[in-house]
Amino acid sequence: MAIPATPISRPLEGEVPAFLARVTAAQWGEAARNVRERGGRLVAVWGADRREAGAAFSIYAAYALEDGLSILDLGLDGDERYPDLSGLFPCASRMQRAVHDLLGLVPEGAADLRPWLRHDAWGPGDFPLRREFDPEGVRAGVPAAYPFVRVEGDGVHEIPVGPIHAGVIEPGHFRFSVVGEKVLRLEERMGYTHKGIDRRFGDFTVAEGYRLAGRCSGDSTVAYAWAYAQAAESVLGIAAPPRARWLRALMLEAERIANHLNDLGFLGNDAAFGFALAQFSRLREDWLRLCDGLFGHRLMMDRVVPGGVAADIDDEACRRMAAASESIESESRALREIFDEHSGLQDRFITAGRVEPGLARALGLIGLAGRASGQALDLRVDFPVEPYTRVAVAKAVHPGGDVAARVRVRFAELFESLRLVRKFLAGLPAGRIRVELAAPRPGAFGVGWVEGWRGEVFVAIEAGEGGRIRRAHAHDPSWQNWPVVEHAIMGNIVPDFPLINKSFNLSYSGEDC
Amino acid sequence: MIPIMLKILRTGLVTEPAPRPREEWRVRASEIGDEILALLGRALVIREVDAGSCNACELEVNALSNPYYNIDGLGIKLAASPRHADMLLVTGPVAKNMEQALRIAYEQMPAPKLVVAVGDCGRDGGIFGAGYATCGGVSKVLPVDVVVPGCPPPPIAILEGILAAVARRAR
């Protein structure tokens, strides 16, 4: 089911509604056109060297359709080419370039084949995800100039920024082509924080890999660990107990609250309103100290594990968290009024970095930034798992598409998450928080899909021999959203870039992995 | 303006006392007198470099600027240019794609070129280890004065590590 063009598609076990189909190259292309016509989205593209399992290379595409995820597996027997997806789904371009850098598979017909994750740490003929790749024998490639797209004409000049940026932020390179103060074009060059996570997964068992998944993007560690746990539980054929599911949701909303408090402070600060950062960073610190006291870690790292959770809370902790959510809500509501009535701040926010809903849809903008451009997508509402099935989550959607809209959506989601925290605390079921893990069957495949604070996090796992991970892939929503930032800045002035960029607050590490 | 002023007044001063330097984290043992904190009367300027972290360490370094830790109040500034910096505060396992940029930042820094490696990744590569894409810790690339363990280390630990490195300059 799910995609008519694919003949055999089987549902995957577990919490996420997902179907896996093995397809031919012709079906691969037809399915992509079909998904596009039906208004579906491309979630992730990754590849695998499955020669160890007696197969060949595989290229995978995960699509979101109205009934859940459809994952296509195209086996490339003796071939290293597959039909390009970027002509239909622009966000596929960088994912396909990454697949080429790591595995050497070529998207036939793609317009852009420049390296993406490969700078010069390994050579153009070395593919780290191939079995024969020897990390000890890798020789640095020859540093080569990256061919940026040039903009030419009277008065046009380039401003190169990064990889090290001015503030305490992640590294990446931005190449602005400007006339005077006005940005004609921005081109991003990423990959600086590439850590080889996909290959590193192979050093862990399915039971252990959650720690690595939780470090793809530290600000979304709960979302990643939960998505990983969903995939692992699907592979292992087990389910987390009810109390663990509620505690996972509690931590996911706590993570959303911490990040939204952070961003609201920095958004004010980037518009020269230091008061906002002082206030919101104080509230964030209060919240992180509370999380530390309750769950034993400020960011709740390694607290969501396959089979359940690694931290429980008692009634007294529930009361403390509920009280803290009340006080943060009342303070944040007062601060929102100050934001709304501050003309200098609104002058910077309104119309800056606008992404119209039509463009957002065409480019595949998702998550928080997507909702602020009219894309009403939220997995907590569209494909709710327990306990989201028990609470009606209000989607925060705004058609504005500018910095102001992204600020509004953050405030709305902050208040909604604070409400959800209280709901989850009040309804927390009793019982155990973790189940024993069985041994995975080699070849078992499972996925996880979680609406993190930034957008949807996707994880796929294939088990190997002896409980090990044969292949795991973690996907950050920043893959979809980074290319849209290039459009958001067009026609704006250079000094507004930090503000516009912060309003998206995308992950470099999550995308570079 | 009035609501802003009222909010500031009602919030009051929440800044907490600064910690003592964490001596046991010092890579190079040396004797340090009690007078070292007096050095914070001068500004210490830090250039933070993310050399491939997962961004959790950046969250905790940024938290140092919140009103509870208030490092600006201690005379510690985070600078944009390494040419203005006394110290590099480095996070991450040093991704090979960041190795060159990190070396250039270090070369550009004037003496005394203090280096603090933050987090388990900065210490030895952490969970990422050393591989085709990672160097396996800051000390593989630069001389490191102080290592702050943790994943991520909480802000107070990072501040203790910074002070331990500053104390080295007191000699």
Image (spheres, rainbow, N blue to C red):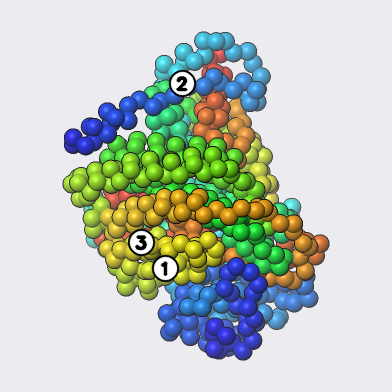
> Residue A270's x, y, as percent?
31, 44
Question: What residue is rendered at 46% in x and 13% in y?
Answer: B38
Pointer 1 with pointer 3, Cβ within 8 A: no
Distance, label 1 to label 3, CA atoms, is 9 Å
Q: Which residue is mark 2?
A: B17
Which amino acid type corresponds to the residue marked 3 in the rendered image? Ala
- The amino acid type, in three-letter code, at marker 2 is Pro
Query: What is the spatial separation of the Cα atoms under label 3 and label 2, in whole angstroms?
Result: 40 Å
The N terminus of chain A: image quadrant: bottom right
Q: Is residue B46 visible?
A: yes
Identify the subunit bearing mark 2: B
Q: Residue at x 39, y 55 (%)?
A: A416
Q: Is the same chain shared between marks 3 and 2?
A: no
Q: Chain of mark 1?
A: A
Contact check, label 1 and label 2, Cβ < 8 Å: no
- Decide: is A502 above or below A133: above
Q: Residue at x 43, y 41 (%)?
A: A323
Chain letter for mark 3 = A
Residue at mark 3: A396
Q: Which mark is residue A377?
A: 1
The answer to which of A17 and B72 lies nearer the viewer is A17
Answer left or right for B98 relative to B139.
left
Disc 1 residue type (three-letter): Leu
Of callouts 1 and 3, the N-terminal one: 1
Q: Can residue A459 be seen at all in this image of the molecule?
A: no
Query: Quarter-wise, where is residue A79 in the image?
Result: bottom right
Q: Position of residue A112 (x, y in %)?
A: 48, 71
Q: Is residue A472 left or right of residue A293?
A: right
Give neighbour class at mark 3: few <14, some 14-19, many 20+ (Cα, 10 Å).
many
Of residue A470 and residue B4, the one placed in the foreground of this image is B4
Q: Secondary structure at mark 2?
A: loop
* Residue that appears at 54% across and 40% down: A317
